[in-house]
């Protein structure tokens, strides 16, 4: 595994955005999508590879199934 991943849990809006013709694209919008991108960027900026990072909401939802380590800011 050479990249890092940012996982968040919450509500987003998905669908086709853009005008008719070749400018259409499928997109995902919402605070949770933006947070996931920020969580994914943080380890890349520090050259950390092969890790999966998540937000507190995801940790709380999955804590019965997975063990988590807190890495701080």
Image: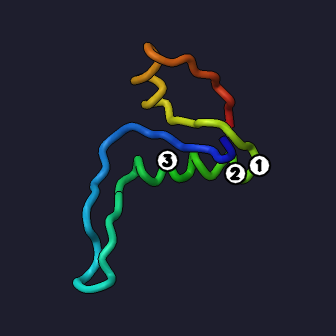
Tally of numbered discs? 3
**Mark 2 falls on what kind of element?**
helix
Name the spot of residue 60 as percent of width and height, x first: 44, 22
Name the spot of residue 11 as percent of width and height, x first: 30, 44
Is there a contact, CB below 8 Å, between mark 3 and mark 1? no
Quarter of the rendering containing residue 64 = top left
Quarter of the rendering containing residue 4 = top right
Residue farthest right in this picture = 47
Quarter of the rendering containing residue 16 = bottom left
In-image side of 5 versus 7 (left or right)? right
In-image side of 23 versus 6 (left or right)? left
Residue farthest top in this picture = 64
- Find the distance from the CA under tag 3 to the CA under tag 2: 13 Å
Disc assigned to residue 26: none
- Report crowding for label 2: few under 14, some 14 to 19, many 20 or more residues within 10 A (C-alpha): few
Is there a contact, CB below 8 Å, between mark 1 and mark 2? yes
Q: Earlier in the sequence, mark 3 or mark 1?
A: 3
Q: Which residue is mark 2?
A: 44
Position of residue 24 relative to residue 56, above or below, is below
Residue at x 50%, y 35% (from the top left corner)? 55
Q: Earlier in the sequence, mark 3 or mark 2?
A: 3
Name the spot of residue 29 as percent of width and height, x first: 35, 58
- Report crowding for label 3: few under 14, some 14 to 19, many 20 or more residues within 10 A (C-alpha): some
Q: Which residue is mark 1?
A: 47
Residue at x 57%, y 45% (from the top left corner)? 39
Q: Which residue is mark 3?
A: 36
């Amino acid at each position: 595994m050479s990249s890092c991943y940012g996982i968040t849990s919450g509500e987003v809006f998905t669908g086709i955005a853009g005008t008719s013709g070749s400018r259409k694209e499928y997109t995902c919008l919402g605070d949770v999508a933006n947070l996931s991108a920020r969580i994914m960027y943080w380890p890349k900026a520090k050259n950390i590879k092969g890790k999966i990072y998540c937000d507190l909401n995801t940790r709380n939802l999955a804590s019965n199934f997975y063990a988590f380590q807190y890495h701080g800011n």
